[in-house]
Image (cartoon, grey):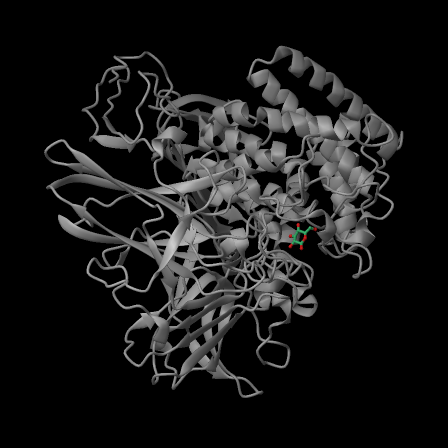
Amino acid sequence: MWDTGKVDSDQSVHIEYDGPALRSATRYYYRVRVWDEDRKSEWSERAFLETGLLDPSDWSADWITPSWHIDPLTVYPCPIMRKTFTANQEIKKATVYVTGAGLYELRLNGRKVGRDMLTPGWTSYHKRIQYQTYDITDDILRGKNAVGVVLGEGWYKGNMTWFDRRNNYGETVSALVQIHIQYKDGTGDTVVSDDSWTAADGPILFSEIYHGEVYDARLEKTGWDMPDFDDTGWQKTVTAPMGYHALVAQESAPVRVMEEIKPVRILQTPAGETVVDMGQNMAGMVRFRIKGNRGDTIKLRHFEVLGDDGNVYLENLVAAKQKVEYTLSGDDAGTFAPHFTYQGFRYLWLEAYPEPELDDFTGLVLYSDIQTTGYFTCSNEMINRLQQNILWSQKSNFIDVPTDCPQRSERLGWTGDVQIFASTAAYNMDCDSFFSKWLYDLSADQKDDGLVPWVVPDIITEDEYPKAWLEGTGDTIPTSAGWGDAAVIVPWTLYQVYGDIRILKRQYNSMKAWVEYIWQQGDHEYLWNTGFHFGDWAALDTNPQNRFGATSADFIATAYYAYSTKLLMKTAKLLGYEEDAHAYQQLYAKIVDAFRKEFITPAGRLSDQTQTAHAVALLFDLVEKKDQQKTVDRLAAMMKKNGYTLWAGFIGIPYLCFALSRYGHAETAMKLLLQTECPSWLYQITKGATTIWEYWNNDTFKASFNHYAYGSIGAWLYAVPGGITIDEHGPGYKHSVISPLLAADFDYVKTGIQTVYGPLKSEWKRDGENIEIGITVPHNTSATVLLSGAEPSSVSENGADLSEDTDGIMRIRKTDQGTEVELGSGSYHFRYPKRP
Ligand code: BGC
C-alpha cells in the first residue's frame, strides 16, 4: 500500500499515514526501520492497524429493542435479545462491530465478548456514540452459533445528576450488532441485528450507574446465549430509529477491571453491622462468593468511610444507593459481580451475607485501560502515600470520562476539575486518547455562542442549575471561569505533553469559540466581571458555609480570560493562523493592561490579599516584572504568618507551590507540602486517607473522599523536587528541562515518566556531602539539566571528569544556580559535592 522510503527527518513520533485511502474493515500491516548517523536498524516486528466501519453506508444492521411497550418512568429488568446463525465454511476471520443505547454486554456462544466494561462508554450520545470492535475469529464455530445482547440503562437512560431524572438521552435502550465473517474460501457472511432477533426479560432486575444492581438468579434463562436454546415464547424485537449519523469508533481505551484487591479485615460496627474493609478507597465493584439457599438474598452496600461513631456511613453518597443484591436460585455456584454499575467505596456493608470470610470478596478496580506512565517516590513515606492517593483518585475518576468523584449521585465530567488536574494526570498516566475523546465531547456540547457547560458530557438541564446561585447573574445556562477554560487548557496540555499538534488543530475552533465567548462577557471589554462563577471553589478563606472562597470572582475570571487568550494566541501562531495570532496578541495585551489597572495598585499590591490571587497572578504572568518579587515575597510572608495553612481552593491549589518555587521561595513551598495540620495535603494522610479528599476539612465536612482536584500538587512533585518539565518549544519532551530541587527535607527523590520517545528519568540522592543525580534522556530528544549548587570542575559523570568530550554531553555552562549541562539521549550519572 505505502512505502515511505528513507526519509531524512528527526521526526520519530506522530508520523501520519499518507498513502492511498484506506478501506473499511480492513487490516493493514506495517513495519518500520530507522537510520541514525552511521547505523541502520533491522526491520521492526510486523504490527497492524485495522480500520473500522468508516462510512455510515457500511452498516447494514438495525438498532433493535424488545417489542413490548414500556412506560419510560418505570424501572424494568434488563432485556436480553438473541439470534442464532450458521457459519458454513471454514472461518478465516470474524469481527463484530457493536454498540448500544444504554450499556450492553455482548454474548457469543455462552461467553461474554471481550473484557470491556460499561460499553459503549459515555459520550454526548445525540451527537456521538462509540461502537466497539472485537476480533471473534476464535469464538465463532463452524456450524450453528448464538449471539446475544444484555442491555442496561447506564448514563443513557438511568438516573443521573442531583435531580431524580431518568431518560436523559432517550427512553428506549437498544443495540446495534454487525458481525463480518470471512471464510477461507474467500466468501463471507454478515450477521446483523434486525427484527428477526427475539427478546425476553433477563435476571438483572435493576442496574444503574449510581444505585447498583439487583439480580435474581431464579429468573436466569440458562443457556439463552447458546445455539440450541429453545426460545419459543420469547417476544419479538423491533427496530429503533437511532440511525448511524452519530456512530464513531472507540476513541479512548475501554474501561476494564484493571486490578484486583483483597479485603484486609471484616469488622463489626458498634451498631452491629458487619463490614468488609478493602483497605483502599477505589471505584469498581466487588466480586463475591455466592452462598446460601434458593430464595435467599445477599445484600451489599458500598461506602467510603465509617462515621464518627464507627458505624456504616452513607450520607455522603447523597442519593446514590450503591447496593448490590443477589437472590439465589439454588443451582448457583461460584461468584457474582454486577454488570452495568460501579461504586466508589472502601467498605462493604454486608446487610445480608451468610458467614462472611475475607476470601469471599475481591475488589475489582475499574478504570479506562490506560498505562500508568509516571512514578514519584522520595524518602518521605507520607509524601509517597500522597502520590499513591493522587494516583488512586485518578484511577477512580478515569472511568471513560474524567469525573469529579466516583461515589455520590454526581460522577460527572466537571470541566474545572479536569482542567485543574490535567497536567498532574498526564505525568501519572498516558492521558492522550482519554482526554482527546473527552475533548470531542466538549466541542460537541459547547453552545453556539462558545459557552462551555459545567460538565461534559453535558447532562445538566436548565432547571437543574441552583436558582439561588444564578440570581442576579443574568445567566440561565451558566459556565464559570476556571471551568470553561478546560476548552483551551486541556488541548494545550496534551500538545505540551504528547507533542501532537493535531490536537490543537482539531480543537482550535472550540478553543477560539471559548475565548470569543468570554470576550462578549463583562461590562468592560477586557475584564470578565459578570455572570456566575465558582470562584475559588472549596477554599477555606471565608466562612465555611461559603464554598466560593474569598478571592473575588472577577479577579479569577479576568485572570483566566488573559490566560486562555494567551494560550489561544500561541496556538494560532503554531498553526500558522497569522491573523488570529495577531488579533489575540492584541486582545491579550489589553486584558493584561485592564487586569493590572483593576486588580494591582500602582505600587504593586494585589487587590485581593489571598493565597489564590497571588498564585494565579504570578503564574499567569499578570504581575509586571518589577513587582514580581514583591508579590511572591508577600505571598511567602502571608503563608508564614498564618502558619503555612492551605486556604486556597480549586483555583489556587495547582499554582501555589509553583508560584513560590519559581520565584525563590521553594522552602515555603516545601513547608506547605509537609504541613500536617489541617488544612494541608498531609493532614488527610495522618487521618488514614487512601484517596484525595474533596475538602481540606472533609473529616468533619464529609463530602467526597475521592476527588482528584487537590491532587493537582502532583505536577509540582514531578516538576520541582523531581525536576522534570517540558520545554514549551520542544513539546512531547522532544526537549526537556530537568532541574530538581534538592530539597533539604528529602534524602532522595526518584521520578520518571514514559514519554512518547521513551523513558525519561530524574533521580537524585544525597550521599554524605555529595549529591548524585541520575538522568535518562529518551531517544531522539535532548535535555537541559541543572546540577544545582555544583561547580563544573567538581562534577563527575560516570566516574570521570565532566567534559564536553563525553558522548552525549553537548554543552557545560556555569550559572548562578550551579552547573547546567545540555544532554543528548542516553543515561548519565552525575556526582558532586554540594556547595554550602
Ligand atoms: C463537584 C466539583 C465541581 C463543583 C463545581 C461539585 O459538586 O464535585 O468537583 O467542580 O461541584 O463547583
- The mark total stands at 0
Question: Residue 163 or 58: which is nearer the viewer?
Answer: 58
Residue 280 percent location from the top left of the image: 47, 66
- Asked where in the image residue 523 lies, by quadrant, the reply is top right
Instruction: Please give left or right for residue 777 compared with residue 147 in the image.
Output: right
Residue 577 percent location from the top left of the image: 60, 14
Question: Residue 142 or 714: which is nearer the viewer?
Answer: 142
The C terminus lies in quadrant: top right
The N terminus lies in quadrant: top left
Instruction: Please give left or right for residue 329 compared with residue 101 in the image.
Output: left
- Seen in the picture, residue 312 relative to 466 is either above or below; the reply is below
Q: Is residue 226 visible?
A: yes
> Residue, x 62% and y 37% (percent of image)?
486
Residue 824 percent location from the top left of the image: 39, 24
Residue 32 percent location from the top left of the image: 25, 23
- Asked where in the image residue 689 lies, by quadrant, the reply is bottom right
Q: Is residue 368 visible?
A: no
Question: Residue 157 or 416: which is nearer the viewer?
Answer: 157
> Residue, x 65% and y 16% (percent of image)?
581
- Seen in the picture, residue 149 relative to 564 is either above or below; the reply is below
Instruction: Please give left or right for residue 162 compared with residue 217 in the image.
Output: right
Residue lying farthest to the right in this orientation:
602
Question: Residue 467 or 618: which is nearer the viewer?
Answer: 467
